[in-house]
Image: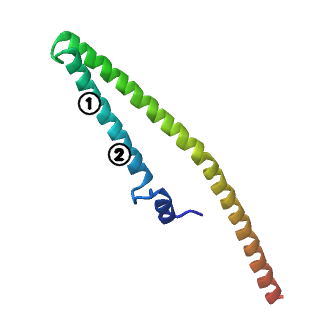
């Protein structure tokens, strides 16, 4: 059965960071690239974000970015669920086996206790 310590060890990337921290950092970098691209696009088009056309363009960019974020989140959740499902099933199977073994051990203890009393 996995412990919290072994899970932490398993989640560590080669450079010592946890997998969720690494993914979070990568995602923040992607968002930074999008923000930079948005500003460069506005500059290259010569639009001021405070003008109606600039504001509308920024609103559309923001909406598209939010949709992308939502889709990425859904994709990550789906991928994690696919990976976890077999692990969760395996853990449940192991727990059932341990319970059966524990019952057999208890049964053997009871038999020995009964033999000693007889």
> Residue 97 at x, y = what percent?
71, 62
Task: Name which quarter of the figure residue 44 lies in.
Answer: top left
Q: Which residue is drawn at 38% across and 50% down?
A: 21
Q: Is residue 116 above or below residue 19?
A: below
> Residue 48 at x, y = what percent?
16, 16
Q: Is residue 45 left or right of residue 102?
A: left
Q: Residue at x 79, y 83 (%)?
A: 112
**Which residue in the protein does label 1 denote?**
36
Q: What element carries label 1?
A: helix
Task: Name which quarter of the figure residue 100 lies in.
Answer: bottom right
Q: Is residue 78 above or below residue 19?
A: above
Q: Is residue 53 left or right of residue 106?
A: left
Is there CB contact under 8 Å for labels 1 and 2? no
User: So how many labels did they put on this image?
Assistant: 2
Q: Give the quarter of the figure containing the N terminus.
A: bottom right
Q: Which mark is residue 4?
A: none
Q: Residue at x 82, y 86 (%)?
A: 115
Q: Give the quarter of the figure containing the C terminus.
A: bottom right
Q: Which mark is residue 25?
A: 2
Would you call the spot at circle 1 few (<14 residues within 10 Å), some (14-19), or many (20 or more)? few
N-terminal-most mark, 1 or 2: 2
Q: Is mark 2 on a helix, strand or loop?
A: helix
> Residue 81 at x, y = what percent?
56, 42
Q: Residue at x 65, y 51 (%)?
A: 89
Q: Is residue 102 above or below residue 54?
A: below
Q: What is the C-alpha distance between the residues marked 1 and 2? A: 17 Å
**Direction top: furthest residue:** 52
């Amino acid at each position: 059965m996995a412990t919290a310590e072994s899970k932490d060890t398993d989640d560590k990337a080669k450079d010592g960071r946890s997998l969720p921290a690494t993914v979070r950092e990568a995602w923040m970098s992607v968002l930074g690239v999008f923000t930079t691209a948005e500003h460069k696009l506005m500059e290259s088009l010569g639009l001021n974000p405070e003008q109606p056309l600039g504001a509308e363009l920024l609103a559309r960019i923001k909406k598209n970015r939010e949709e992308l974020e939502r889709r990425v989140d859904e994709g990550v959740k789906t991928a994690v669920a696919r990976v976890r499902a077999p692990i969760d099933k395996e853990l449940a199977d192991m727990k059932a086996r341990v319970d059966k073994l524990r019952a057999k051990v208890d049964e053997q203890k009871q038999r020995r206790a009964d033999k000693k009393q007889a």
